[in-house]
Amino acid sequence: MRRDAIFRAVAPLPSEIATNEEVLDAMSFSQVRKAQLFAVFGALAIALALGPGARSGSIPQLLTLGPVTVLNGTAIVSGTVGGAGAGSQLTVNGHPLSLDAAGNFAGVVSLEGASALDFSVGNSSGQLVDFNVPVALAGPGGIIPGSVVDAVEQAGATLLQPVGGFVGGQPLTVAGSVADKGQLAALAVNGTDVMRLLGPDQSFSVQIPGTTKEITLTATDTSGVSQTTHYKVLDSSSGLATPLGPYVSASSAVGLKIVKVRYVAKGVAKTKRLRMIVTVKDSRGYLVRGATIKIRSKAAGRLTRRAQTKTSSKVGQAAFVLRVKTRTLGKRLVMVTVARTPTAKAAKTTSIRLAKARSSTKR
């Protein structure tokens, strides 16, 4: 059914016609401005239509670009962020661009006089990687080919990050490697040249001060395109080493995971007690101190106290004593654990089958 079959069109009043004409006249553009707008939106439409092309390479790419158009102080960009998931972010010269579920993006960014495009890719774990593309690489029509970041990515520069991350307080020995040094013109760690340190196996090692707050690895290809990976250094005063690894406070944790739930049920049939130990870490693998951990029996009537709450220690653990009712012995006890920090939450369901109650036999 047509819409005008329901709502009959009403002729506009003469005064309304005059007002509309004035608005249209105020919104009119000069021929030069129209041409600029058509060029910008036309280039964006082409970028969206073409998208990033699939390019071969043994190393999965973090950033795959489509053709970039530099025009009238703006850049029309599109592409894909590899492995994008919840918490992934992209900014171009400080301007955030949204990512869809597959990591695709497209947009128009003002250069504001900048001589390079800076693509900054971050994720929920706090990892940050910057790609710097000189605007001078634009060819005819202001086009920078999408393959411009391929060489620096395929060089495969990386650092060997210790389990638990880098912890400051004493001099750090930083080791790393590249997959193909032939793609690079320069390689630096915190500004120190390590290209000359590459051995036959394309690895290197360099020492940096223990006061360092961040480690950066910058790889630059022969065209001037660079990739800088940022690695956080945990402050020794806020992430002290423990027998189980370094820890951070709940407010400094990035994400949260319940990595282990352990039960100690020896003698439960006699004492009707067992211990439950919960261990939590953040997404970087650091133990979390001060996380709020709540446990409860999934079914009512299994424990004398169904729910308990504690905070995790510096080894990322909270220990609970569970008092079971006699009728629970010989059955499976299902426990629900929920851990929280100011910015994250994690949950896990675990269970244990308890020993049967001892029978009292008179002789």
Image (cartoon, rainbow, N blue to C red):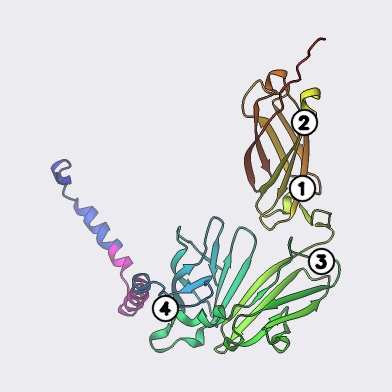
Residue highlighted by disc 1:
316
| Contact (Cβ within 8 Å) of mark 2 with mark 3 | no
Task: Give whichever of 121, 309 is nearer the camera.
Answer: 309
Looking at the rendered structure, the kind of residue marked 1 is Gly
Q: Is residue 147 visible?
A: yes
Identify the mark nearer the N-term, 4 or 2: 4
- What crowding class fits label 2: few (fewer than 14 Cα within 10 Å), some (14-19), or many (20 or more)? some
Could you tell me which secondary element the residue under label 3 belongs to?
loop
On the image, numbered disc 4 is attached to which residue?
A: 67
Alpha carbon separation for disc pair 1 and 4: 47 Å
Q: Which span of residues is magenta-colored?
A: 24-45
Mark 3 sits on what residue? 168
Disc number lying in front (4 or 2): 2
| Magenta residues, dominant SS class | helix
User: Disc 2 versus disc 1: distance between alpha carbons?
Assistant: 20 Å
Could you tell which of marks 3 and 1 lies nearer the N-terminus?
Answer: 3
- Residue type at mark 3? Gly
Residue under pointer 2: 274
Camera-nearest label, 2 or 1: 2
Q: Amino acid at mark 2?
A: Leu
Q: CA distance from mark 4 to mark 2?
A: 63 Å
Q: Mark 3 near mark 4, Cβ–Cβ under 8 Å? A: no
Q: Secondary structure at mark 2?
A: strand
Q: Nearer the viewer, mark 1 or mark 4?
A: 1
Q: Residue furthest right?
A: 170
